[in-house]
Image (cartoon, grey):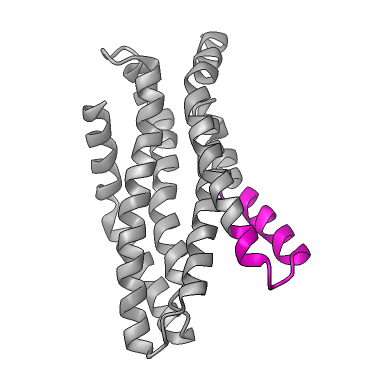
């Protein structure tokens, strides 16, 4: 699994010029509109969605069938992607917090703890309700890649829109915190059951 993690991290790192350009543009926008909290979700999700892209790359490049011949169990191959997403999540969150504090200092916007907590909760909602099913769907077929990416992005948005339109402002932080906790539980549940599901897909498509 270590070798696969190294390969995927190098694959993400290879796209650093594009990621850096997007990060600079996003940071510039947050400075212009004086909204440093947008960096929490923007920066982290930009990086985390790259983990879904690594599976899409494995499928379209022809690496995935060859990967199955390596001395790594299918369970290990699937788990590696979920572990990769957790590593990228931790790194992205730390980077996002650094940029957040930097933008706050530049714009002289006071750091708002409640807003920060809500944005971190929203991040975990995207991670649990979006990234987890997106990772799983990416394993189905190479044609499923775009659908997986849409699910990863749009499903959490739909959930958040429902919450923001039905929950009062006084309770929205509490609801987001609950959804964040549920999202992380869901992430690990999908992680645990994914090897069996993916193995079934592979046997059916063989």
Q: Residue at x 27, y 34 (%)?
A: 5
Q: Which residue range is magenta in the image?
A: 153-176
Find residue 65 and report its horizontal and vertical position in percent: 38, 18
As displayed, is residue 60 above or below residue 198? Answer: below
Q: Residue at x 27, y 29 (%)?
A: 4
Tell me the quadrant of the picture where the N terminus can be found: top left
Q: Is residue 83 left or right of residue 174?
A: left
Find residue 135 and report its horizontal and vertical position in percent: 49, 36
* In the image, farthest residue toward the right: 166
* In the image, farthest residue toward the bottom: 108
As displayed, is residue 110 above or below residue 89? Answer: below
Q: What secondary structure is the stretch in magenta mostly built from?
A: helix
Q: Residue at x 47, y 30 (%)?
A: 191
Residue 134 seen from this side? no
Residue 194 seen from this side? yes
Find residue 58 and report its horizontal and vertical position in percent: 38, 30
- The answer to whether residue 38 is magenta is no
Asked whether 66 or 40 is in front, the reply is 40
As displayed, is residue 119 above or below residue 4? Answer: below
- The answer to whether residue 157 is magenta is yes
Q: Is residue 97 left or right of residue 201?
A: left
Q: Residue at x 43, y 29 (%)?
A: 59
As displayed, is residue 27 above or below residue 157? Answer: below
Find residue 89 and report its horizontal and vertical position in percent: 38, 50
Query: Where on the picture, by quarter, is residue 149?
Result: top right
How many dots with numbers? 0
């Amino acid at each position: 699994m270590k070798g696969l993690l190294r390969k995927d991290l190098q694959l993400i790192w290879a796209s650093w010029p594009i990621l850096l350009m997007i990060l600079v543009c996003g940071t510039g926008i947050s400075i212009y509109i004086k909204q440093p909290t947008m960096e929490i979700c923007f920066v982290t999700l930009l990086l985390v969605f790259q983990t879904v892209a690594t599976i899409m790359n494995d499928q379209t490049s022809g690496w995935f069938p060859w990967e199955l011949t390596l001395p790594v169990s299918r369970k290990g191959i699937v788990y590696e992607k979920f572990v990769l997403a957790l590593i990228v999540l931790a790194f992205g969150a730390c980077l996002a917090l650094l940029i957040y504090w930097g933008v706050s200092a530049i714009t002289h916007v006071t750091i708002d703890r409640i807003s920060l907590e809500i944005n971190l909760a929203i991040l975990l909602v995207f991670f649990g309700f979006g990234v987890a099913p997106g990772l799983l769907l990416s394993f189905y077929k190479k044609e499923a890649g775009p659908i997986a990416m849409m699910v990863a992005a749009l499903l959490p948005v739909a959930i958040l829109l429902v919450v923001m339109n039905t929950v009062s402002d006084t309770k929205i932080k509490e609801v987001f915190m609950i959804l964040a906790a549920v999202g992380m539980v869901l992430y690990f549940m999908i992680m645990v059951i994914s090897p069996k599901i993916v193995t079934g897909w592979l046997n059916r498509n063989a």
